[in-house]
Image (tube, rainbow, N blue to C red):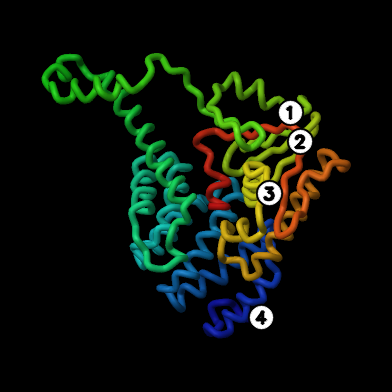
Amino acid sequence: MKKYSEYTLDELLEVEADWWDREDETNPKWINEGLNIFLELLKLDRKNSRYLEVRAYLLILHGEFLKIQDRSYERAIKVFHQIIKLEPDNARANYRLGFLYFYEEEWTKSLDAFYQAAHSNPNLTRKKLTAEQMVKAHYYILKNSKIITQASLDHIDDMPYKQLEQNEELKLLLDEIRNGIEPNEEIKPYQMIKNGVEYSNISEEEYDMYSDIDQPTFIFNQISLNDTEISYNGRSVSIPLRNAAILEYLMKNPSGVSKQDIISRLSQQSKDPEAALRQIISRLRRKLAELDPEIEFIKTIDGGYLWTGAGQYRMFKHFRCVGTELQLD
């Protein structure tokens, strides 16, 4: 069998088509094969943004399996920069870059990427943000700004008082900022969502109490980028990142969602997005059946799916976790 480096462009495109026919993003071998295929395709056509986008997508999946051992996310960041170099107005590339930098705790770079995403004006739909993505981009602009501002305030608190006394403008600005921050505000690093609609920030202690898997409430707990756990009545199972993203979206929209709505949010690289979605829903149902085989957690409705759950449910995420956003936004 020839090496991929020995193939012509037309031959490699045939190999790519066969690879898509075997699409299985839960299979590390399929992911690695794709990474090799698109590496060779890029050698033959370095300015093809589609090849770059697929490779970035595969690197994120690759990182999920390896738990960041081979620095796949840093490689994905480099690929997104390549896309932006070719297409400076690509708002979606900047948007996803913002999430990767946020996960890496590079707050300033994340802020810049989200700002570029929100203020780009691309002429092609594939490069534009959706209305919901635009809102989320501004959310992360504010979130990054808050983190950066707090870090600056902490640094200023360590400065000698005489240095501050020499700058009246800084003193006035500090007064303005601090008047907008509640004194001794309790740190609440977790977000809790009840029944898909009631949002609140909670403390570490509250998180430990409300996320207890032994209670009869269904719990969706995104512990980190690579670790999402669902539990019910004392049983719990882990689910992959992409599956978690779709489950979260269903749970946040308890009135039901259309297949096309979900597909429009999935990575556009899939050759057959409807088949890919059916496969993900099937896997989700099998995982949910491990918690209770008698409950139909996800119901098929006309043109879409409905989260029926098991009564009350709660969802948890640490504010620094961007796992589902990377996969479904």
Residue depicted at 34% across the width and 63% down the height = 88
Residue picked out by circle 4: 1
Image coords of residue 150 (percent x, y): 35, 27
Residue 167's image quarter? top left
Q: Which numbered mark, 3 or 4, is in the foreground of this view? A: 3
- Crowding near the residue tagged with mark 2, few <14, some 14–19, many ≥20 C-alpha atoms within 10 Å: some
- Crowding near the residue tagged with mark 1, few <14, some 14–19, many ≥20 C-alpha atoms within 10 Å: many
Say what amino acid the circle numbered 2 marks. Answer: Ser
184 w.r.t. 282: above or below: above
Q: Which numbered mark, 2 or 4, is in the foreground of this view? A: 2
Image coords of residue 165 (percent x, y): 14, 16
For the residue labelled by badge 4, is the local secondary structure a helix, a strand or a loop?
loop
Residue depicted at 53% across the width and 39% down the height = 321
Q: Are marks 2 and 3 in contact (CB under 8 Å)?
A: no
Decide if residue 137 is on the left or right side of residue 263.
left
Residue 196's image quarter? top right
Residue picked out by circle 2: 236
Mark 2 and mark 3: Cα distance apart in space: 24 Å
Mark 2 and mark 1: Cα distance apart in space: 7 Å
Mark 1 and mark 4: Cα distance apart in space: 51 Å
For the residue labelled by badge 3, is the local secondary structure a helix, a strand or a loop?
loop
Q: What mark, if any, has residue 213 been given in the picture? A: 1
- Crowding near the residue tagged with mark 3, few <14, some 14–19, many ≥20 C-alpha atoms within 10 Å: many
Mark 3 and mark 4: Cα distance apart in space: 48 Å
Q: Earlier in the sequence, mark 1 or mark 4?
A: 4
Q: Are marks 3 and 4 in contact (CB under 8 Å)?
A: no
